[in-house]
Amino acid sequence: EVQLVESGGELVQSGRSLRLSCAASGFTFGDYGMHWVRQAPGKGLEWVSGISWNGDTVIYADSVKGRFTISRDNAENSLHLQMNSLRPEDTALYYCGRRMKNTVAIDIWGQGTMVTVSS
Amino acid sequence: ESVLTQSPGTLSLSPGERATLSCRASQSVSSTYLAWYQQKPGQAPRLLIYAASSRATGIPDRFSGSGSGTDFTLTISRLEPEDFAVYYCQHYGSSPPWTFGQGTKVEIK
């Protein structure tokens, strides 16, 4: 079964750091680009960051650029998001997602991990 | 900056009716890079349509996508009870690279 499982979300104070992880299974992880998308409580989807299949290309939303770092370990089938200088507005459910081949869409989503940043 | 605007914000319809959801881009986008997702409460989003009009694996044919340039549409031909949800469009561009619309909620009338 193709699956993504996020972990690492918790309650943290503003200004602190947190590292999210996403464990992939059921497919050849190293063949796919991966992304993080977040959703604040009661709000819509916001794209956060993406990484190419080999990690050579990374992209970020302006709202997290310079504070968040996306990375991947293809040997471990894992995706990570290092989040520094967290702000209350980063409070959200963070999803990892697999970019579908040959197009620009996310075809597999995890169930999300909740990050809460207190002021 | 590229912005996607979805309308209406809420669509109130009955089962069996046709739903037409709009997604308008502030700049012309390639239809290759336009997707639609469905999200139900407490669940992750699910890909419905990619490349503006191609259905994702396992998506019923009552869902269809169309459009080009700046105007795109998701149509649900006959609403089933399980189709009441929030729908998002998404595209890939230059700045920002990935953008989601604000969503359209399809609710039971």
Image (cartoon, coloured by chain):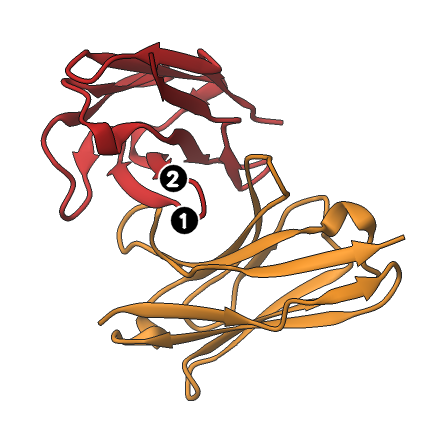
Position of residue B93 measured from the top left corner of the image (x, y, whole percent): 49, 35
Q: Is residue B90 above or below residue A4?
A: above
Chain identity of mark 2: B
- Quarter of the figure that contains the N terminus of chain B: top right
Residue under the point 26% across and 38% down: B48
Q: Crowdedness of circle 2 by 10 Å Cα count: few (<14), some, many (20+)?
A: some
Say left or right for A14 vs A91.
right
Q: Which residue is at the far left? A: B61
Q: Crowdedness of circle 1 by 10 Å Cα count: few (<14), some, many (20+)?
A: few
Residue under the point 71% across and 51% down: A91
Q: Which mark is residue B65?
A: none
Position of residue A100 measured from the top left corner of the image (x, y, whole percent): 30, 54
Say which chain is red: B
Is residue A84 visible in the rendered structure shown here? no
Residue under the point 41% across and 50% down: B44
A29 or A21, nearer to the observer: A21
Under tag 2, what secondary structure?
loop
Q: CA distance from mark 2 to mark 1?
A: 5 Å
Position of residue A17 measured from the top left corner of the image (x, y, whole percent): 79, 69
Say which chain is orange: A
The amino acid at mark 2 is Lys
B95 or B9, nearer to the observer: B9
Say left or right for B97 vs B53.
right
Please say if the residues under marks 2 and 1 sit with CB atoms less than 8 Å apart: yes
Q: Which mark is residue B40?
A: 2
The amino acid at mark 1 is Gln
Q: Is residue B101 above or below residue A38?
A: above
Residue under the point 84% across and 55% down: A118
- Quarter of the figure that contains the C terminus of chain B: top left
Say left or right for B16 vs A56.
left
Q: Which mark is residue B43?
A: 1
Q: Quadrant of residue A20?
A: bottom right
